[in-house]
Image (cartoon, rainbow, N blue to C red):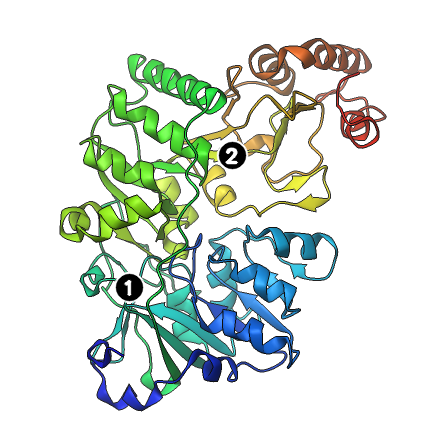
Amino acid sequence: MSYDRIKLKSLHDKVITAEQAALLIKNGMIVGSSGFTKAGDSKVVLPALADRAKTDPLKITLITGASLGHGTDGKLAEAGVLAKRMPFQVDRILRSKINAGEVLFIDQHLSETAELLHNKNLAAVDIAVLEVAAIEADGSIIPTTSVGNAATFAALAKQVILEINTAVPIEIRGIHDIYQAEDYPRRNVIPIVAPENKIGRKTIALDPSKVVGIVFTDIEDSPADIAEPDAKTTAIARHILNFFEKEVEMGHLSSSLLPLQAGIGKVANAVLMGFKDSNFRNLTMFSEVLQDSTFDLIDAGVMDFASASSITVSKPCYDRVFGNLDKYRDKMVLRPQNISNTPGLIRRLGVIAINTAIEFDIYGNVNSTHISGTNIMNGIGGSGDFARNAYLSIFVTQAASKEDRISHVLPMVSHVDHTEHDVDILVTDIGLADLRGLAPRERAQVIIDNCVHQDYKEQLQSYYDRACERGGHTPHILEEAFSWHINLRDQGTMKK
């Protein structure tokens, strides 16, 4: 054990095992855990809790920043530990438990969880499990690869368990910018006017008297699943880059654009990697997650600075970054998610937001969370924080999938996460629809003309034409609006 990572000597006697730490979590507790998109999460205490529950059943409410790695959400769900989970998840086992009604899930904008806790609109956190790189002499803690909601948990939890991860180099100190806005009604302006502005402290403040256990670990984050760009994601990236080039030609944007935000996954990586061989330079990012593509762009000299709440990368990229922290130290910052995702900053900085849709409809409403309106996939994450407040709100998806049996452009979405009022640009592998300044009837025709797979274009045009005959500001045929989803359920295809 590296006691040199505990600079406050009075905490040395708090070192325990993961199993002992798990015993501190009691039935019915509200538990907060660090972790944001599989980065900086509990590696041993929560898994030990899942093991304990196999013979000593208990239920908790678990609040994190976003998703956990190493299958921890699935282990907890399978062991019956989770009564309620928020605000985001990506685990297959947990997802099935949620959709079966066995676990209650609160799908929430990622900027809001800390706000609800600070405003006492959620019950107080009983105990927090926080991964750290070290404990400073003043009791403050150095986060690891994410900040997420850890600063809020440290401030508000009644008790705290710390996991000191010795796999994270101590040199990580200094890449974090920990700032917490004041409580209402006298909240000040958050003084960030550019992604590179640092306004807070390097560590998270923590009252040492709250610490009830310290556990040592040496486990790295779960590596991100990085898929190589395919024909569809490459086409989507090309459409977006062509759009940006035209915006520059018209004088709407410069070659450095505005700060970029991109959701996680292969589409986002493909879009960002498209900038590598483009004419765009001096790019910046104000986002939630730094992925492989972020560091590839930094290495290529295309991106100058990136701000987010976590680093979620592949194993080779992890080794590259954390083996050369001094190279990247002045090019990135990690913040609490209620700063990285705060609506006011997104609007002030003029962020260009690029997020993924499951489906969208002919009027521009976007479903990013539910399959056929019922079964949740992952959650809304931060896409809503950015979509409603961005300079440009872009949503992307493939035009059709599953051997083209499913169209992702529909008469009406089966679940609405982002209304037509929050969506500027829609992109599929077929093309791009710019919806700015268009009325509903204009939007519908632009989407049909530019985004729909050829197998569904005639079918969707027929629906729209017949709906227009009935009239209305936003024409629909209610008895047919969800017929595509019904056909998929009953016939295995949306084609008629």
Res. 145 image quadrant:
bottom left
Camera-nearest residue between 224 and 9: 224
Asked whether disc 1 touches disc 2, contact meaning CB atoms under 8 Å apart, the reply is no
- Mark closer to the observer (1, 2): 1
| Vertical order, 377 against 392 (above or below) | below
Q: Position of residue 404 (x, y in %)?
A: 66, 20
Residue 173 position in % (x across, y down): 21, 63
Amino acid type of the residue tagged 2 in the rendering: Thr
Q: Quadrant of the N terminus?
A: bottom left
Front residue of 116/334: it is: 334
User: How dense is the environment of label 2, judged by Cα within 10 Å: few (below 14), some, or many (20 and up)?
Assistant: many
Q: Identify the mark at residue 356; answer none if there is no mark.
A: 2
Quarter placement of the C terminus: top right
Q: Tell me the tag on residue 167.
A: 1
| Image location (x, y in percent) of residue 73 | 55, 60
Q: Is residue 333 above or below residue 404?
A: below
Q: Earlier in the sequence, mark 1 or mark 2?
A: 1
Foreground pick, 369 / 115: 369
* Relative image position of residue 68 (x, y in whole percent): 48, 58
Q: Residue at x 71, y 35 (%)?
A: 414
Give the amino acid type for the residue marked by disc 1 in the picture: Ala
SS at badge 1:
loop
Q: Residue at x 44, y 82 (%)?
A: 159
For residue 462, the mark is: none
Which residue of the protein is positioned furthest toward the left in this rendering?
A: 326
Q: Is residue 254 visible?
A: no
Residue at horizontal 65 percent and vertical 26 percent from the top:
402
